Amino acid sequence: MTAQKTLNRAFSQFDSCSTLKKDDCELQVNVFSHVTNEETLAGLIRRAKDQSALMIYTLSDPELRSKSSKMCELSAVHSVDLMGPLLDGLSYFLEEAPLGTPGGDDKIQRQDPRKAVLSSSYYRRIEAVEFTLKADDGSAPWLLKDADVILVGVSRTGKTPLSVVLAQQFGLKVANIPLVLEVPPPKELFDPCIDSDKVMCLTINPVELKRIRLNRLERSGAKQLEETGGVKTATNYADRNYLMRDLKNARDLARDKGYTEIDVTGRAVEETASLISELLTQKLAAKNIEFEGWVEEMGGYVDALATSAKSEGKD
């Protein structure tokens, strides 16, 4: 009932469907619970497509949630994922992967969710999230050789939240390394065993980066004053000249090493994650390399895309 309660609250923000004018609202809401398999999910998406409906879902299973997003996109069904962003945020905050089991049913809540039968995809995601949290912010450079993807970039380009989404939604082991002008990257990044195709350099518009860094400084200002006994300390963190040199340093490294540059300006974290997964698929397919388990999961999506292309007469 989570989605229905949230939807009712949302309706109150629209004059045509507010509580006072509920009888005048032309929208019909259908609620479907206990959606636990891909077949049921696919049927609901087909129904939503036939009725030109908006699909809102609160799926706890990360595999079903990912497939729902992909199937809705392929079917041109507008959808809203209420649970995914919340679970991703909590996973990062708590440094713990969610169980991925349904919790809305009273009977299910009385059971120990750890005793539920979980898919191999679930355990792969758990392992990926644990790896990603260990390798966050350059804290474990010795893990770079074991990463499926390595994110590098200057401060405030969203490396950590992007890493968590890649691990949670795609089961990828992600390491991220901050690039700082005064500090050389860890030597492990340049080890011959590191495939440059797996390294993504995040860049951003300098105006947007300055805005983000200024906000960061404002939020941390009170804490800095407290730690320095009320004495303000100078910083060039958001200085335009320093910022431009910071970005240039990152781009120069990407060009020298053959890393893929990805501009995150104006992109949602989920959008950037999808882009990276597609790029990795293309790059590794060209080398006949597969991530264990990951390509298997993406296989259904690739097959669906191929079927869609054939139906449109494309080769």
Image (cartoon, helix red, strand yellow):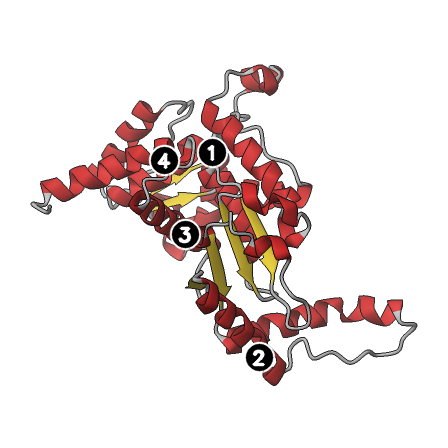
**How many angstroms separate mark 1 from mark 2 (CA)?**
40 Å
Q: Is residue 103 left or right of residue 96?
A: left
For label 3, count other residues whose C-alpha is less than 10 Å away and answer few (under 14), some (14-19) or many (20+): some
Q: Mark 1 and 4 residues: CB-CB less than 8 Å, in contact?
A: no
The residue that appears at 15% across and 44% down in the rendered structure is: 309
- 102 or 11: which is nearer to us? 102
Q: Which mark is residue 62?
A: 1
- 278 or 100: which is nearer to us? 278
**How many angstroms separate mark 3 from mark 4 (CA)?**
14 Å
**How many angstroms separate mark 3 from mark 1 (CA)?**
18 Å
Is residue 49 at all visible to an observer of this figure? yes
Mark 1 and mark 4 lie on one chain; the one further toward the N terminus is 1
Q: Which residue is mark 3?
A: 276
> What secondary structure is found at the residue carrying circle 3?
helix
Mark 2 and mark 4 lie on one chain; the one further toward the N terminus is 2
Rendering quarter of residue 114: top right
